[in-house]
Image: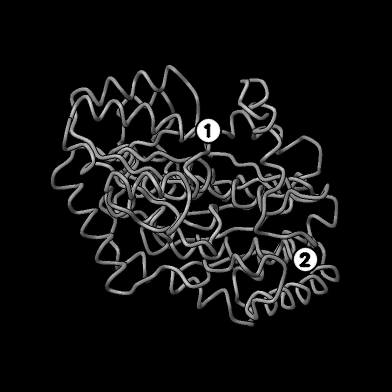
Amino acid sequence: MIEYSDTMIRERYPRDYSAVRKEAESALKTLVARNGTGSDLLGWLDLPDTSPEALNSLLDTAKAIRDSGDLLVCIGIGGSYLGARAFIHALFGDRHRVRFIGHHLSPLAWSALLEELETRDFYLNVISKSGTTTEPGIAFRILREFAEKKYGNTTNERIIATTDAESGALCDLAKKKGYRRFIIPRDVGGRFSVLTPVGLLPIFAAGADPDQLIRGASAGFKASLSLNERNPALNYAAGRTCCYRKGKAIEVLASFEPRMHYFSEWWKQLYGESEGKNGKGIFPASVDFTTDLHSMGQWIQDGVRNLFETFVMIDHYQRDINIPKDQDNLDNLNYLADQPLGYVNRKAFEGTRKAHEDGGVPTSVFHLDYLDEEHLAKLTVIFEIAVALSAYMLGVNPFDQPGVEAYKQNMFALLGKPGK
């Protein structure tokens, strides 16, 4: 179960919230009718594809990777890797068989990866609609050559292309080389693609439970596409829009679980690319508590009052550790003896939320019963629907990203790309 609470926002801005909530309902009707701006990119509302043909192909390939390879190396940038990384890190921490590359140009990180691959059997999953994006394009060149030197004539059996169905450089290469292929639906943008093969193949290869994930996604759509008072996506979109119109231009997503770090990174792309247009939009930031309470916590507590805070809390842990008693008690922590860490973590959240509210920061919170495939998938869908509603209320297209091209054109010119 996922519960969303925004009591403070409702109490702080009662009239404004009531009006914005009605706008959110109107935006939801537009989304459901699929007649708003960007309606040609609403294929994510029908995900995941659970047809036996689509699902079995993913599961069989994921099993083959687990059975005959040490590692899966995913090559992609933005939505082509963030969703998968979010799920995998949340479920498995640092103990998993997936590596991510193609989202940066660091020689140091590259050297470390190639050194690791020298002694490991690996598969490559290159993820790109076009196959010409600079960072993953360079990554695939390097790794394809590396794999060919290591595996020779069997290299093509170890490369999986997730790309457009019919066109593009990667599609053409995959057909020519005979790579296994998975399709990125044309009506699904990158940041909404985690429940397509873009995200599902790596997630399943890491060992995630497909039944739980599918059940969570279905529950997310059911909860978020209905016009009722408990709709978490609708209420979240209304609350954050209300804060924005009251001058709160920054949203901080805060979690007390380190495994949620990359989920926050995925959230930042989803909200930043969807809303930040035409001089508008809430700036999405994230913090990892309690760690960042000793750094960013100061700014949140006492800085400019132009932000609001959304917490994501895990209420129960499948495993917990009790704090031991110490005879000398030199650290004065015996008052916590025999308490579970989860209990102390929860009290840290409660104390932090109260402190930030007392400091003038509007807050809301998502409560997840557990950190597992079902809850992650449900929260993913809630956030996707909420950002569509928020962008509609903001008056921007939630599904394009025209500003992303500016840095590329400058970089191409500086690198001397022909025709630039």
Please report contact status of discs 1 and 2: CB closer than 8 Å, yes or no.
Answer: no
Way the structure is coloured: one colour
- Picture residue at 64% right of the left edge, 82% below the top: 227
Disc 1 vs disc 2: which is toward the camera?
A: 1
Q: Residues within 10 Å of mark 2 (few under 14, many from 20)?
A: some
Looking at the picture, which amino acid does disc 2 mark? Answer: Met
Which quadrant: the N terminus? bottom left
Q: Secondary structure at mark 1?
A: helix
Q: Secondary structure at mark 2?
A: helix
Q: Which residue is denoted by mark 2 in the rendering?
A: 393
Q: Does 310 sit above or below residue 261?
A: below
- Picture residue at 31% right of the left edge, 35% below the top: 325
* Residue 133 x %, y %: 53, 38
- Picture residue at 24% right of the left edge, 53% below the top: 62
Q: Nearer the viewer, residue 34 or 415?
A: 415
Q: Nearer the viewer, residue 331 or 233?
A: 233
